[in-house]
Image (spheres, grey):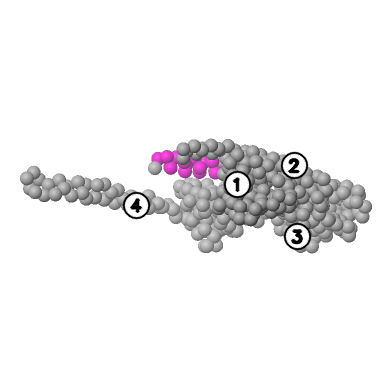
């Protein structure tokens, strides 16, 4: 109990110091680059996936009796290479594993460029360490092949087993192949072909969208940028590809002070974490906090009969129930309180992170918490 109280006090002090550091001084809003606030529509990566075989494993491959698709894949591959496997033959493969190969095709990637791939076991292989991925086509969402993957797998782990004992370091059924895939087909892109690009803010905010439009129009003249909504901004660009690239690079480097974000409280119900941003404010409310604990101790009791009484020894239990309640405290929180006032007030009545979960939810239900409450 003493240890828990110490941890709670330490947590309260750390939170208070952190909040005071944030709210003690009124600092002007820092300017961010447009590159950090928004992305360009169409400039994105595309996920690729493929099914393949890993060979050369040291007896740590799939147990083919439990993963028949591994055997089917091997037979299909050998048939394509001109090797006929007798019908009904039983293949006991230990050095082969069926895997899924995944990667992301970067924007504007061209044929011949290489990208990293992740190889993950699909069956029950014990380890992919030391294996080699055979040529695997990687397809996109349109079922077209965009890259070919092959190479030696790097697994950041090790393991050993003997006589029923097993030791393993890190994860052995997933590995990577640096530069393991070669791009075979580019993704068509018509960025700025119509003389416009679309900037998409990372977070929808009408005030920030207005400031981005003002910054661009101030630099390049009225009418260059136009906000379509609180997230998308249309920007006129030069028609030449070289001029367009230079223009986009310059626009991304413009500094804009983003608007203050909406008040929000994030609660992680599993870990007890509570995060609040600076705009969180309170209406007038009173918070009562008290702890009720019930402790039940059960001990075995042996009843021995008197000598020569022909009685029997009986085992029973004795239970003691203790109920203790710490005195409740009522804290008045005045309207307009800032983040630092909220945290200091809750800490002053001994609220732990778990208590904050219930208190903040009750404040929101009562209409005293002027912030969005999000539980993750």
Answer with mark 4 or mark 1, whichever residue precedes in sequence. 1
Residue furthest to the right: 240
Q: Tag 2: Cα neighbours inside 10 Å, few (<14), some, or many (≥20)?
A: some
Dot placed on the residue nearer the N-terminal end, 4 or 2: 2
What mark, if any, has residue 93 been given in the picture?
1
Mark 3 crowdedness (10 Å alpha carbons): few <14, some 14-19, many ≥20:
few
Any mark on residue 179, and which? 2
Q: Mark 3 sits on what residue?
A: 142
Residue 261 marker: none
Magenta span: helix, strand or loop, mainly?
helix
Disc ID at residue 294? 4
Disc 3 and disc 1 in contact, CB within 8 angstroms:
no
Q: How far across and how far down the image is residue 253, in percent?
A: 81, 46
Check whether the beta carbons of the residues at disc 2 and disc 1 lie within 8 A of each other.
Answer: no
Answer whether residue 211 is visible to the viewer in this image. no
User: Where residue 204 sits: x, y (%)?
Assistant: 71, 58
């Amino acid at each position: 109990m003493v240890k828990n109280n110490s941890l709670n006090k330490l947590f309260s002090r750390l939170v208070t110091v952190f909040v005071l550091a944030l709210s003690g001084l009124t600092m002007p809003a820092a300017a961010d680059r447009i590159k950090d606030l928004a992305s360009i529509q169409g400039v994105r990566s595309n996920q690729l996936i493929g099914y393949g075989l890993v060979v050369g494993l040291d007896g740590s491959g799939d147990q083919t009796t439990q993963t028949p698709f591994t055997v089917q894949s091997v037979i299909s591959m050998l048939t394509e290479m001109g090797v006929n496997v007798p019908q009904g033959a039983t293949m006991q493969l230990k050095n082969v594993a069926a895997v899924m190969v995944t990667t992301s095709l970067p924007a504007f990637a061209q044929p011949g460029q290489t990208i990293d791939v992740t190889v993950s076991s699909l069956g029950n292989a014990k380890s992919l360490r030391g294996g080699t991925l055979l040529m695997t086509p990687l397809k996109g969402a349109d079922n077209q092949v965009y890259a070919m993957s092959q190479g030696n797998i790097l697994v950041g782990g090790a393991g050993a087993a003997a006589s029923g004992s097993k030791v393993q370091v890190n994860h052995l059924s997933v590995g990577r192949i640096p530069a393991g895939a070669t791009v075979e087909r580019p993704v068509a892109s018509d960025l700025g072909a119509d003389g416009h690009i679309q900037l998409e803010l990372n977070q929808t905010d009408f005030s920030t969208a207005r400031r981005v439009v003002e910054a661009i129009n101030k630099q390049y003249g009225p009418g260059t940028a136009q906000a379509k909504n609180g997230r998308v901004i249309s920007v006129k660009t030069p028609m030449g590809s070289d001029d367009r690239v230079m223009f986009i690079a310059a626009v991304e480097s413009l500094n804009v002070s983003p608007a203050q974000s909406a008040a929000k409280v994030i609660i992680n119900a599993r870990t007890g974490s509570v995060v609040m941003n600076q705009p969180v404010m309170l209406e007038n409310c009173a918070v009562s906090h008290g702890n009720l604990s019930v402790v039940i101790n059960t001990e075995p009791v042996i009843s021995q009969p008197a000598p020569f009484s022909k009685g029997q020894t009986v085992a029973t239990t004795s239970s003691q129930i203790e109920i203790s309640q710490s005195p409740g405290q009522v804290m008045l929180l005045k309207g307009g309180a800032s983040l630092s006032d909220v945290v200091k007030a809750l800490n002053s009545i001994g609220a732990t992170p778990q208590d904050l979960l219930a208190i903040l939810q009750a404040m929101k239900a009562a209409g005293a918490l002027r912030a969005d409450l999000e539980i993750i």
